[in-house]
Image: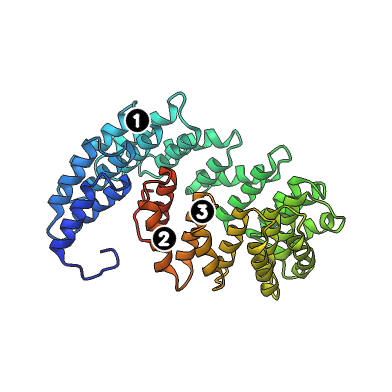
Amino acid sequence: MQLGSALPPQSTARWLSAFALSPLLLPHHRVEANWDLAELDGHREEGAALLGRLARGRDVGPFERSWAAAALAGLDGHREEGAVLLESFARDPALNDRTRIASARDLARVEGHEDDAAALLEAFFTSPGADEYLRKAAAEFLARLDGHRERGARLLLGLAQYGDTAAARALAHLPGRHGEDGVGLLAAFAADPGTEPRDRVWAAEFLAEATGDGERAVRLLAAFGHESPSLSAARLIVAEGLTRFDENKAAELVMQGLAFGGFRSFDRVRALRVLARSTLHGEVAAEPLARLAADPTADSAYRLDAAEVLAGLDGHREEGVALLAGITQDRRVLLYDRMLAAVALATLGEERSAPLLAAFAAAPALQSDGRVWAARALAQLDGHRARGITVLAAFADDTALDPDVRSNASTSLDTLGRNRSRY
């Protein structure tokens, strides 16, 4: 339907109705089927009735019930019905915070209910014990509502003043003086030695995002990087953030540490990845990456990472691919990591990964979630979609498998399609 295919309307309606009512489907799939039915010509009322039934019943969880109510509120003739349900979900203290705030946010999108939603969002923000991330989301939603921007901005400022970079980011995207406050706070966080390293990097990145001034972010990050010891975690964090803006300056931050053999194994791969992205210094990373990827005494996860980075380096694709292929066959390497090497080959579009992935998906010695991962990678490889989907479907239908594994397979199938999601 979403692709515009010429499906027979009556049969499609019957299928969607059956899917909407099926307890065998994942809850969010049932909401999608209801929603699609309501948008099918001539079946709006049928779909609306099923959405209302789902929202009022106990067949699915509260988040999906609330989502069904939001879909209902978007249908002509059912706006108030959906709004009443959304408000009841937002006010219900027995429901989880995620459901309540999503309900209030969607209520704000229903014409005539903006003020009620704003009051609910503010009440949620001030309620004791509320999740910090969701409090921030409530303030941000409030600040986007016409007529309520001042209240939302005030709440965001209260969070941002205590060092919350995400709240300052939201504030920086508001017009006028609120945006100026957010920009000022981000600049202060990025320059403050007392701010945690990762927060300083995020502040610089958010500042560039809000102002469009990448050069300012480069100056802030470069200054921070050079004030940090050459082998410190802080310098590596800064270098990784700086690659967004200036790959060569980022490389310069890690070169000294690498030259003296510094960084632990995992951090060494991270530093080499930064170096490999540089147009001026990338070639310097090739030899140590190849040496690490080929080292049978090194941790297999580091070998795998090194080979992947090498394969992405100009002029070294074949070398990296050969090393990845070698890891898939190395019996000294954990079976799971050998499977991940095959997945990395598939990500690179290598046809040789297809038989490897098929073999891993069928390997009883490989833990079940690894078999699902291999099948998903196979389905994403050009020319092997049908084969991978068949294997994933078999996992999803296998009642002998752990329910989490079956759900993983079902979700993998889901992401190969065109499902809706709730934002």
Q: In the image, residue 212 lies at what x, y percent?
A: 58, 59
Residue at screen point 41% across, 60% down:
391
**Nearer the observer, disc 2 or disc 1?**
2
Quadrant location, the N terminus: bottom left
Q: From where the camera sits, is residue 219 visible? A: no
**Nearer the observer, disc 3 or disc 2?**
3
User: Earlier along the polypeptide chain: callout 3 or callout 1?
Assistant: 1
Q: Which residue is mark 1?
A: 95
User: Could you give the CA–CA distance between mark 3 and mark 1, rounded to whole angstroms?
Assistant: 41 Å
**Nearer the observer, disc 3 or disc 1?**
3
Q: In the image, residue 407 lies at what x, y percent?
A: 40, 47
Q: In the image, residue 32 lies at what x, y percent?
A: 28, 52
Amino acid under disc 2: Val
Q: Is residue 143 above or below residue 19?
A: above
Q: Which residue is mark 2?
A: 391
Quadrant of res 413: bottom left
Query: Residue lying farthest front?
Result: 364
Residue at screen point 84% across, 57% down:
256
User: Could you give the CA–CA distance between mark 3 and mark 2, rounded to whole angstroms?
Assistant: 14 Å
Q: Which residue is mark 3?
A: 364
Quadrant of res 162: top right
Amino acid under disc 1: Leu
Disc 3 residue crowd, few under 14, some 14–19, many 20+, Cα 10 Å: few
- Give the camera-side residue of 324 and 274: 324
In the rendered structure, find residue 161 and report the number of the disc placed on it: none
- Give the camera-side residue of 158 and 60: 60
- Residue 176 is left or right of residue 215, and the answer is left
Amino acid under disc 3: Pro
